[in-house]
């Protein structure tokens, strides 16, 4: 379980650059995994502050992104059946100052023009969440594009 925020201001979206253990960095939404016993609402507030320096106000629950994948694992005897559930909130910056995270899963935070996001090296959640932000699905679930 994880919680992420879509923060849009002046036609720009706030993104954090995720640094995987292997591979090249990619842009993502600020957010991340819930700690045991933590409410997702509190998770998104904490994660956005950790990764960007901003304090946000949650203004809306945009939706839920649920993915299932089989991943190979070197240390385990076989593949792992992974199920990700990511809550996507809309947020508004309420305080703080933009800064980069040090020693975490991201190394940079920045505002990006909405019309230039498609040119960024980014994870799929960015596109999914921006689509939720634009479409505002009543059920919180996007209908598959045809």
Image (cartoon, rainbow, N blue to C red):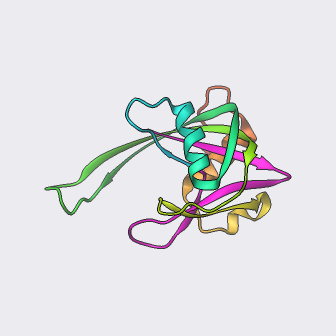
Q: Position of residue 91 (x, y in %)?
A: 70, 39
* Residue positioned 72% across, 46% down in the render: 7
Where is residue 122 shown, x and y percent of the image? 58, 63
**Is residue 146 among what the camera can see?**
no
Extreme residue toward the bottom, this view: 24
Task: Please tell me whether residue 24 belongs to the stretch shown in magenta.
Answer: yes
Q: Looking at the figure, which quarter contains the N terminus?
A: top left
Of residues 45 and 60, which is closer to you in this image? 45
- 89 horizontally vs 114: left or right: left
Q: Which stretch appears magenta?
A: 1-30
Single out the residue that lies furthest toward the top: 139
Examine the residues drawn in magenta and state their main secondary structure: strand
Displayed quadrant of residue 72: bottom left
Q: Is residue 94 left or right of residue 85?
A: right
Q: Position of residue 39 (x, y in %)?
A: 49, 29
Picture quadrant of residue 84: top left
Left or right position of 14 against 28: right
Foreground of the two, 108 or 125: 108
Q: Is residue 125 above or below residue 59?
A: below
């Amino acid at each position: 379980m994880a919680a992420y925020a879509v923060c849009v201001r002046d036609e720009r979206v706030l993104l954090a650059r995720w640094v995987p253990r292997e591979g090249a960095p990619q842009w993502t939404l600020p957010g991340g995994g819930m700690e045991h016993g933590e409410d997702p609402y509190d998770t998104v507030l904490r994660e956005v502050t950790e990764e960007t320096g901003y304090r946000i106000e949650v203004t809306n629950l945009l939706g839920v992104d649920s993915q299932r994948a089989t991943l190979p694992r070197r240390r385990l005897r076989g593949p792992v059946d992974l199920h990700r559930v990511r809550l996507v909130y809309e947020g508004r910056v309420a305080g703080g100052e933009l800064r980069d995270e040090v020693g975490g899963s991201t190394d940079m935070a920045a505002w990006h023009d909405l019309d230039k996001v498609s040119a960024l090296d980014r994870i799929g959640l960015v596109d999914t969440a921006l689509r939720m932000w634009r479409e505002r699905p009543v059920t919180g679930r996007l209908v598959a594009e045809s």
